[in-house]
Image: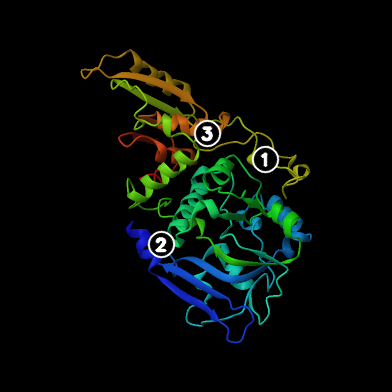
Amino acid sequence: NGLVDRWRKTRKTYCAPRAGASVASKIDCFLIKQTHHHGAGDNLCLGENVRVNFADLADDTPKRYFKRYVDSRHQQQHSKIAYRKGTLAGSCDTQPALWRKEHFPGWNVNWFNAFQPTDDLKCEIWEDAPTLIIERDTFANFFHNSEDFVNTFLALAILEWNVRDLQIFLTDLYPKGPFWDIWDRVFRGARAPLTAWDLRQKYGDKNVCFKRAAVAILGAAAPITVASFNTQCAASSVVRAYSDYVIRGLGLAPKTRYDGRRSLDPTRVVVTFLARRSQGAWPELRFCDAERSFFDCKMLEHLGIRKLNRSVRNDKDVVAALRALEKRDFANGARVVVQDVDYSELSFEDQISINLDTDVMVGPHGAGLMHNIFMPDRAALVELFIDGSAANRHFH
């Protein structure tokens, strides 16, 4: 793929091995400037023989950050910790022309600020598995979650890492969330992905050294999730490969249209209305778990039913109009089947299964339309712009 090849060729040494160190470290980064993306570029950094100490997860810091998250009405920056100096360390010398704050966009700057050169790593634990450190953009918005999913896929390709050997660390404070299947099934090899809570239980405040550990690409750098212009990745090899990778990782290949074992009716056209209704609890409340995450349910009891914007107020009429197509005769013999689906009521696997058998997806602008990436090649998306959302180009 052109993007992956170009990204891989940008590799430069940002922190060179220190002479005389008992265990020499090295940090190489892949900084690329993507079309229309702001800032100095989008970065992926790979450390060799580097140390991480998760002391900020072992004390009361997560509790303070979560209170800020609640008090700020869920501002996502409070789900990422600004780590103390020395959280990340290496026996290497930074290169001033490259080791610059602007080369670490978004919350990845926390790792830049946390880095400290050292002569002695003082390792208490060594981890051999290639480890990808990810700070999720969010945990319950399929559009923004897809940023991290796509970037993880790209990072593995750029680094030429095999998922069988992979260890994923999710160092934000979020709980697992509704799309956990992608982390736990699609990107899981021999090792389960670990959340910040898991890291606290496993490592405490010990010095953990990694033969290979990479700080992942910032979520907003994903080439497919853009807002103000049409993505250049539509129907590209990256999109097709990512979609196929997820489908196979979930074991859903037999449900695709291209699987030869299925008997298909060529006249059948499935129209799926993607309902957007305010009838579910806030995801923070649905997925909080004080025993296995930093999201304390007691601090979220004030949340009730989540009111969604951009809802189709007469969606029953819209569905009725679509169902009228089922009774129409078409010159080409097409037979329309309409389904009204609220994805919030389905498992993630069932959601993807519906996408695989949808010819036309209809729905109001919103994160759920990201499901179009898993529809058959010749499928179409009808996006309803409601309440001033017409300026957004997320799905073009």
| Mark 3–mark 1 CB contact (< 8 Å) | no
How does the figure colour the protein chain or chains? rainbow
Height in image: 117 above or below 226? below
Residue 365 appears in the figure? no
Query: Which residue is drawn at the image coordinates 52% and 44% (left, top)?
Result: 186
Q: Quadrant of residue 87?
A: bottom right
Where's the N terminus, which quadrant?
A: bottom left
Q: Which mark is residue 37?
A: 2
Q: Place residue 9 in its image quadrant.
A: bottom left
| Nearest to viewer (mark 3 / mark 2) | 3
Judge from the rendering whether residue 220 lies leftward or rightward of residue 2; answer left or right.
Answer: right
- Which of pointers 2 and 1 lies earlier in the amino acid sequence? 2
Determine contact: label 3, label 2, CB under 8 Å. no
Tell me the number on the disc at residue 349.
3
Give the mark, 3 or 1, whose residue is nearer the N terminus: 1
Q: Which mark is residue 3?
A: none
What's under tag 3, amino acid-wise?
A: Glu
Q: Which mark is residue 287?
A: 1
**Foreground: 364 or 343?**
343
Asked whether the beta carbons under mark 2 and mark 1 sit within 8 Å of each other, the answer is: no
Q: Going by the image, does 221 lie left or right of 192?
A: left
Residue at (74, 40) in percent of width and height = 302
Residue 372, how many percent across, how many down? Answer: 40, 38
Mark 3 vs mark 2: which is more N-terminal? 2
